[in-house]
Image: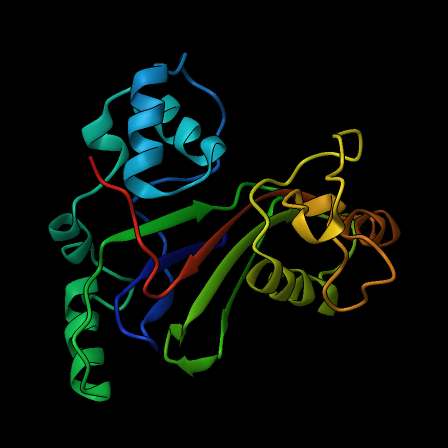
């Protein structure tokens, strides 16, 4: 089972993608309870995550806001697979690049059977168990075949085109293609002559969800 952590920091090269095996913050999961709309709106504002991810987090934790989102201090205390905490890794990175950094939000997506997770950061600077970059994406998808280069290209598209929702082919399209925010309706960044939806149909891929992080992004906190 693949597990990825992705966390935003304040430094330009501070976007992290960690692989680990436990601890859950926001992730794709089966619905467990009805979601309180007030808590959903609050979580959406505080984290900046998509409605679907916030809904899933609240469902899993029975509408308990404090359990659905971790504070910056709690994030720092999470232990990675090599025994270090995220705070330790943050301090080591600060020492390496010589810039101050913070850890205001993170997300973990746990891949269930049949669900593939693809992590990507740009510009990419691989280190042991993590990559760094200004932008980061975790893409959750399903495909009966073997993951190919197209999965990485879809991550590149999310970074470059910044879709807001996955959407379906039956959803209405924006009047102006340049203002399209639905993933499946956007012109494919790698080949603008086709849409993402057409690429997904051709490759027999279903996009379940995605998370996009950008170093320096502004979060709205109540």
Q: How many marks?
A: 0
Q: Position of residue 98 (x, y in %)?
A: 18, 87
Q: Quadrant of the C terminus?
A: top left
Q: Is residue 196 left or right of residue 82?
A: right
Q: Position of residue 28 (x, y in %)?
A: 48, 37
Q: Position of residue 174 (x, y in %)?
A: 72, 39
Report the residue at 44% width, 46% height from top: 109
Viewer can see residue 124:
yes
Q: Locate residue 13: give its quadrant.
A: bottom left
Report the residue at 59% width, 49% height from top: 163
**Residue closest to the eye, 185 or 77:** 185
Q: Locate residue 190: give its quadrant.
A: bottom right
Report the residue at 11% width, 52% height from top: 73
Task: Say how the picture is coloured.
Answer: rainbow
Viewer can see residue 148:
no
Q: Locate residue 187: give its quadrant.
A: bottom right
Q: Is residue 93 left or right of residue 215?
A: left
Please, which residue is most extreme toward the left here?
73
Q: Is residue 203 above or below residue 59?
A: below
Q: Position of residue 221 (x, y in %)?
A: 22, 40
Q: Is residue 15 above or below residue 111?
A: below
Report the residue at 42% width, 58% height from top: 213
């Amino acid at each position: 089972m693949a597990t990825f952590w992705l966390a935003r920091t304040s430094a330009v090269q501070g976007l992290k993608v960690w692989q680990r095996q436990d601890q859950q913050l926001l992730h794709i999961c089966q619905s467990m309870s009805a979601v309180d709309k007030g808590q959903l709106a609050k979580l959406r504002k505080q984290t900046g995550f998509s409605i679907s991810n916030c809904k899933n987090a609240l469902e899993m934790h029975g509408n308990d806001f404090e359990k659905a989102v971790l504070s910056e201090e709690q994030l720092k205390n999470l232990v990675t697979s090599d025994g270090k905490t995220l705070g330790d890794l943050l301090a080591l990175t600060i020492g390496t690049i010589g810039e101050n950094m913070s850890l205001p939000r993170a997300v973990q997506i746990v891949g269930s059977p049949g669900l593939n997770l693809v992590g990507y950061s740009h510009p990419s600077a691989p280190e042991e168990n993590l990559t760094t970059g200004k932008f980061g994406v975790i893409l959750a998808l399903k495909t009966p075949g073997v993951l190919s280069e197209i999965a990485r290209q879809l991550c590149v598209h999310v970074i470059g085109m910044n879709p807001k929702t996955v959407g379906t082919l039956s959803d209405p399209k924006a009047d102006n293609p340049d203002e399209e925010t639905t993933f499946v309706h956007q012109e494919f960044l790698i080949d603008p002559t086709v849409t993402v939806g057409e690429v997904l149909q051709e490759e027999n891929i279903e996009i379940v969800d995605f998370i996009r992080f950008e170093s320096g992004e502004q979060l709205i906190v109540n």
